[in-house]
Amino acid sequence: MIEAPVGGFHGPVKRSITIAGHQTSISLEPVFWQALETAAVRLALPLSALVAEIDAIRIVADDPPNLASALRTWLFINFR
């Protein structure tokens, strides 16, 4: 039988980040914000720089997803 995550489920939290010189708001669940912050530390990048790099990869895709989806996908593939 599966169980709820420790601490329960939490909905998205909106945060503002500067990407390429402009502010953007991103809504992610706290677990994804924590994972992004951990990834940024591991890669020795500021959080905004990591998000900007993922965004740059996202926008050249054939059918680019929204930024929040791209961040979740990148984290799942690279940091599970």
Image (cartoon, rainbow, N blue to C red):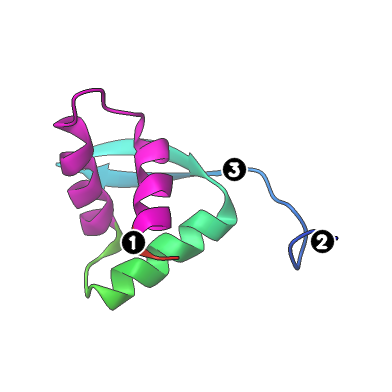
- Residue sitting nearer the eye, 62 or 13: 62
Left or right: residue 31 compared with residue 37: right
As helix, strand or loop, the secondary structure at mark 3 comes to loop
Camera-nearest label, 1 or 3: 1
**Which residue corresponds to the image point at 37% horizontal and 56% vertical from the top-left?**
77
* Residue at the outermost front position: 1
Q: Position of residue 49 (x, y in %)?
A: 21, 57
Residue type beneath disc 2? Glu
Determine which of the numbered discs, if any, sits on residue 14 in the image.
none
Q: Position of residue 70 (x, y in %)?
A: 35, 40
Left or right: residue 14 compared with residue 73: right
Quadrant in the picture for residue 23: top left
| Residue where numbered disc 1 is placed | 78
Specify the segment rendered in magenta: 48-77
Left or right: residue 53 compared with residue 40: left
Residue type beneath disc 1? Asn
As helix, strand or loop, the secondary structure at mark 1 comes to helix
As helix, strand or loop, the secondary structure at mark 2 comes to loop
Which of the marked residues, 2 or 1, is nearer the chain's N terminus? Answer: 2
Category of crowding for the residue at label 1, using alpha-carbon neighbours closer than 10 angstroms: few (below 14), some (14–19), many (at least 20): few
Which of the marked residues, 1 or 3, is nearer the chain's N terminus? Answer: 3
Residue type beneath disc 3? Pro
Quadrant in the picture for residue 22: top left
Q: Is residue 34 magenta?
A: no
**Which residue corresponds to the image point at 25% horizontal and 65% vertical from the top-left?**
46
6 relative to 76, above or below: below
**Which residue corresponds to the image point at 76% horizontal and 65% vertical from the top-left?**
7
Q: Position of residue 36 (x, y in %)?
A: 40, 61
| Residue where numbered disc 2 is placed | 3
Identify the image quadrant of the C terminus: bottom left
